[in-house]
């Protein structure tokens, strides 16, 4: 009997069912657009740190220098533990390869300019200019703690050095504002060369900064000094907490008024573009989130009105069935189940089409389906509560 009621609802009210289906499709499309917009904004916000990375630079106290700084190794260690990525740091050293340079007293810089770095980006030299003996050094050279180096091709030629040779020379760590601190004599294996333009600031030798730091420890230096450092904040959505933590570990906001040359305690956080974009995305997410209840209320109102009008237009069928001994509520519940089925079918079909053709995310599809079915069930409950307060005579004679 219940199946018969549903079949009559569909076949005797085709026009109304078609209109109801169109309304279902339209409401589903609106909800899909709404849910996809929120999810897209949230994903964009989470991925914004890759599109607009927030880089933090260690500078002097006045903020006008990012290199040739006195940066304590302890501060670099603290920065590494502060949720940063893509760290780029350097240290400067010098060596005396020739006998003439080794006779300098006091040491004035020798004849070998050495740059220690933790990655190729920190050197300012493009990867394409490097040539290594072993392919593994392409990615692992600057991460090594071994006594290996890469020489400037011109320096190697001038000193008759080749890849695979060992270079033995005394090394001095450069400390800005203080000069050079002697380390022990080191024997370093040449594992590659690089080509650059002949300029005064081009280093003769590149070494891994971790190896140089270990050499400083062996030489008994109390602190290892880096000369430059920058990194990317790993979670820029918590910038306030990051800035607070930086102050706690000893860094200070820059002050252009301070007359400082090389104290590596200042901090510049390049976050302007990220903050602006993140603020706009958050405003959009908050706006859409605040519309959730009004939007669902509108959906429930439209769905309730549609169901009520369809039941209203089947009042004569209900009255006829009631005169034949069929309960009014049996008919109304049957019609309600039919309308729920129709809405479920329309919503599911629309979402499947959106999922396969427009590649709407699976997450959005499930969210829309749950939200729409929730609204449909609430609508049915509202309609049934309204009808419960009405007598069959009132239902038949409504205008």
Image: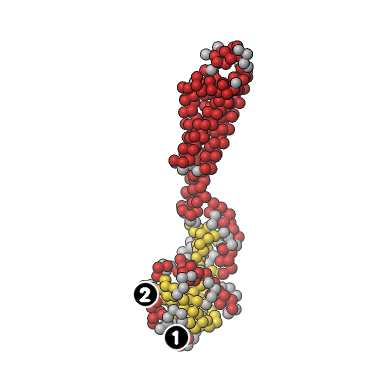
Vertical relation: 131 (above or below) 158: above
Q: Which residue ends up furthest to the left in the rendered image?
A: 197
- Residue 229: percent from left, percent from top: 50, 66
Res. 371 visible in picture: yes
Mark 1 neighbour density, 10 Å: few (under 14) some (14–19) many (20 or more): few
Going 56% across and 21% down the picture, which residue do you hit? Answer: 4
Q: Is residue 4 above or below residue 343?
A: above
In the image, residue 236 sits, relative to residue 136, either above or below, namely above
Residue at 45% over, 88% down: 99
Residue 118, disc: none
Q: Nearer the viewer, residue 368 or 45?
A: 368
As helix, strand or loop, the secondary structure at mark 2 comes to loop
Residue 108 visible from this viewpoint: no
Quadrant placement of the N terminus: top right
Q: Are marks 2 and 1 in contact (CB under 8 Å)?
A: no
**What residue lies at 53% left-to-right and 83% top-to-bottom?**
185
Which is nearer the eye, 296 or 67? Answer: 296
Q: Residue at x 55, y 20 (%)?
A: 311
Whichever of callouts 2 and 1 sits on the residue coming sooner in the sequence is: 1
Instruction: Point out residue 357 in the picture as x, y percentages from the top left corner.
Output: 44, 40
Specify how the rendered protein is coloured.
secondary structure
Secondary structure at numbered mark 1: loop
Q: Which residue is mark 2?
A: 198
Whole-percent x, y for residue 180 in the image:
51, 78
Q: Nearer the viewer, residue 62 or 59?
A: 59
Q: Residue under circle 1?
A: 98
Image location of residue 207, percent across then percent down: 49, 74
- How far apart marks 2 and 1 lie (CA) works out to 20 Å
């Amino acid at each position: 009997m219940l199946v018969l009621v549903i079949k009559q609802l569909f076949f005797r009210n085709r026009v109304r069912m078609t209109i109801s289906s169109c309304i279902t499709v339209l409401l589903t499309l609106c909800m899909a657009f709404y849910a996809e917009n929120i999810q897209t904004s949230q994903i964009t916000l989470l991925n914004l740190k890759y599109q607009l990375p927030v880089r933090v630079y260690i500078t002097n106290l006045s903020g006008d220098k990012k290199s040739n700084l006195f940066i304590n190794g302890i501060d670099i260690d603290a920065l590494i533990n502060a949720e940063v990525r893509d760290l780029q740091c350097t240290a400067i050293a010098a060596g005396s390869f020739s006998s003439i340079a080794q006779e300098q007293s006091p040491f004035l810089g020798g004849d070998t300019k050495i740059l220690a770095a933790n990655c190729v980006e920190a050197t300012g030299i493009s990867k394409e200019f490097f040539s290594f003996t072993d392919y593994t050094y392409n990615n692992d050279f600057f991460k090594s703690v071994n006594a290996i180096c890469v020489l400037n091709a011109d320096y190697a030629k001038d000193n008759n050095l080749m890849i695979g040779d060992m270079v033995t020379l005394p090394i001095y760590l450069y400390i800005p504002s203080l000069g050079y601190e002697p380390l022990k004599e080191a024997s370093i294996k040449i594992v590659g060369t690089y080509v650059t333009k002949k300029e005064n600031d081009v280093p003769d030798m590149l070494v891994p900064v971790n190896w140089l730091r270990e050499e400083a420890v062996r030489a008994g230096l109390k602190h290892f000094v880096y000369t430059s450092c920058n990194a990317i904040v790993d979670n820029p959505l918590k910038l306030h907490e990051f800035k607070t933590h930086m102050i706690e570990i000893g860094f200070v906001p820059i002050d252009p008024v301070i007359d400082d040359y090389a104290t590596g305690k200042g901090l510049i956080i390049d976050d302007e573009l990220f903050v602006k974009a993140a603020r706009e995305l958050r405003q959009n997410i908050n706006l859409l989130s605040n519309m959730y209840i009004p939007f669902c209320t509108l959906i429930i109102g439209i769905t309730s009105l549609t169901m009520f009008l369809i039941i209203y237009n089947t009042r004569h069928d209900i009255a006829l069935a009631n005169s034949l001994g069929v309960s009014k509520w049996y008919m109304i519940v049957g019609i309600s189940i039919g309308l729920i089925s129709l809405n479920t079918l329309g919503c599911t079909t629309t979402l499947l089409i959106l999922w396969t053709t427009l590649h709407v995310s699976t997450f959005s599809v499930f969210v829309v389906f749950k939200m729409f079915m929730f609204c449909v069930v609430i609508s049915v409950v509202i309609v049934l509560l309204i009808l419960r307060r009405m007598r069959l005579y009132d239902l038949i004679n409504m205008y």
